[in-house]
Image (spheres, rainbow, N blue to C red):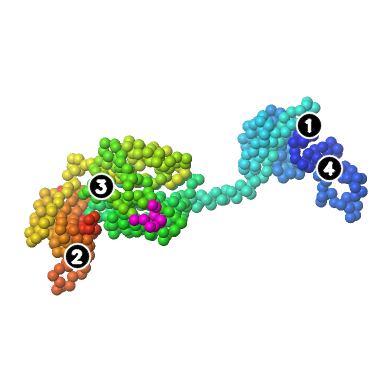
Amino acid sequence: MNFTRWSARLPGTQRRAAARTDRGSVPAARGEYAQRTGHDSDAPGGDSLDAVPALDELSVREILGRLPALVALVYGPEHRVAYVNDAYATAFGPREPGAPAAVALPELEELGLLPLMDQALRGGTPRTVKSRKIPKGGSYTITCTPIETSGRGGSEGGVLVFAADVTDHAEAAERLRASERLLRETAVTLQRSLLPQELEQPDDLRIAATYQPGGTEAAVGGDWYDVITLGAGRTALVIGDVMGRGVRAAAVMGQLRTAVRAYARLDLPPHEVLQLLDGLAAEIDASQIATCAYAVHDPNEGRLVYASAGHLPILVRDADGSVRRAEDHTGPPLGTGGWMHTSGTIGLPPGSTAVLYTDGLVERRGEDIDEGVDRLETAVAGATGTPQVVCDRLIRALGVTAEHDDDVAVLVVQHPARTGHNAELFHNAALELLGGIEAAPRARAFASGVLASWRFPVELCDLGVLAASELVANSLQHGTPPMRLRLRRTDRRLIIEVTDGDDHLPRRRRADPADEAGRGISIVATIASSWGSRRTPGGGKAVWCEFALPDPVA
């Protein structure tokens, strides 16, 4: 087997070297060179051909033999071995010419190169695989180049296997990947640690949430959710998404979530919470944009009061399976500034389910996001079961897998329709207060009768009547009509609330011994589990207190 014909496929000096294959060894070539030029490399002061070799005089065998890359030449459909260079022999040992590659070059089969060699031989185009680890260690990029060989039996197709050592590059790439994995794991850990570790469960609602980071190739985003009990049976529901990626997005998300919880404690309307959050988002990081939906559920009203800053619409599934969207009252994302947010309402009656979610659940490349929301709406219409079951079904229905390219957060809120014994544990009673000297005794008599009918222990009844009396007296003295006393019981607590038309919120203060007033709120705060106040739509206020019920309730 000679190398003359296939060497014509080699570039530059290697083709010229191939033409010299049969002319002899390198020493003979040096002699010819000396005769032509008059230079003797062995003479003192002569040119050193070892330092500057005459490439035209080198044989192809010597060129390939000196390469640090692994080189093997095979021919025929069985890929019979014609030649392996010194580097290849060093890595795998010498090979017997003429034997099929499947036998003589088992390492090529272990690397899965035989099919690639077949493709190169049949198609006539080179094939390359990057960074394959060889059995002896190290990583190589391997190119299989089709060539034409000639021998005593005539011309026959062959393949030149050229394996370049890329071990250093592969190890550097692996270190980079390991660093990226560590950074991503840090971001995921930070993200999860900033989310609620356990959701608050209000008396009137059943809630579940799920968070799934993007696949290993996706940077972690800033999706978050939260559930905040506000007192008097009211609950704030939050879903948000920081548009950045990585640890920075997770850190911004944590700051926004903390701020939302602080603003929620002020018991402000949803649009005022977003207004405050908008200014804070710009201060945290002007380059980060975040969306957020904030909703408050009041069991006395059976609805959600909500506001949205660039977030996707809340979906509500009614008991009959129909789905409604809360699409109004949506402003630009947080951090943009200059926008006055507004609040809207959407009904959440018993038997209904609300779904809050981030764009990772519905957004797909090359598709309008409204199409994704339509798919989610269809999935919500058919999703039944507990809130956690609904979460899982929505994730599956929207095709979210472990390799999804974006973070996903879903918050499912159910307002269960209670029947039987459970229904007996939830009651409401209200009394309109017309003012005058008879309002306080009427309120005490009403509270006493209602609490007795709910079969509370005598001690709890007495405390409840005292609290109702003090709240009503405070409203009569400092408030304006219309006034209302509302009593509510759940399976966990007794709630007493008084509303009036004045928006000045009371505060607890220390009354001097000579003061004739100022002790009502202090008395309520002392005997109740908790108390609070908030402004109501229309310019009024509500003052409330709660008593934890004994377990079990008689």
- Earlier-in-chain disc, 1 versus 4: 1
Query: Which residue is label 4 attached to?
Result: 57
Residue type marked 2: Ser
Query: Which residue is label 2 attached to?
Result: 522
User: For residue 1, which numbered disc appears in the image?
Assistant: 1
Please name the residue shown 17% across and 49% down the image: 428
Query: Which residue is label 3 attached to?
Result: 303
Distance from label 4 to label 3 (Cα)? 92 Å
Is residue 162 found left or right of 281 in the rendered image? right
Local secondary structure at mark 3: strand
- Earlier-in-chain disc, 3 versus 2: 3
Distance from label 3 to label 2 (Cα)? 32 Å
Residue 539 appears in which quarter of the rendering? bottom left
Q: Position of residue 186 (x, y in %)?
A: 47, 53
Mark 1 nearby-residue class (10 Å; few <14, some 14–19, many ≥20) = few
How many numbered marks appear?
4
Residue type marked 3: Arg
Give whichever of 535, 340 is nearer the camera.
340
Q: Is residue 338 magenta?
A: yes
Q: Which residues are magenta?
A: 332-340
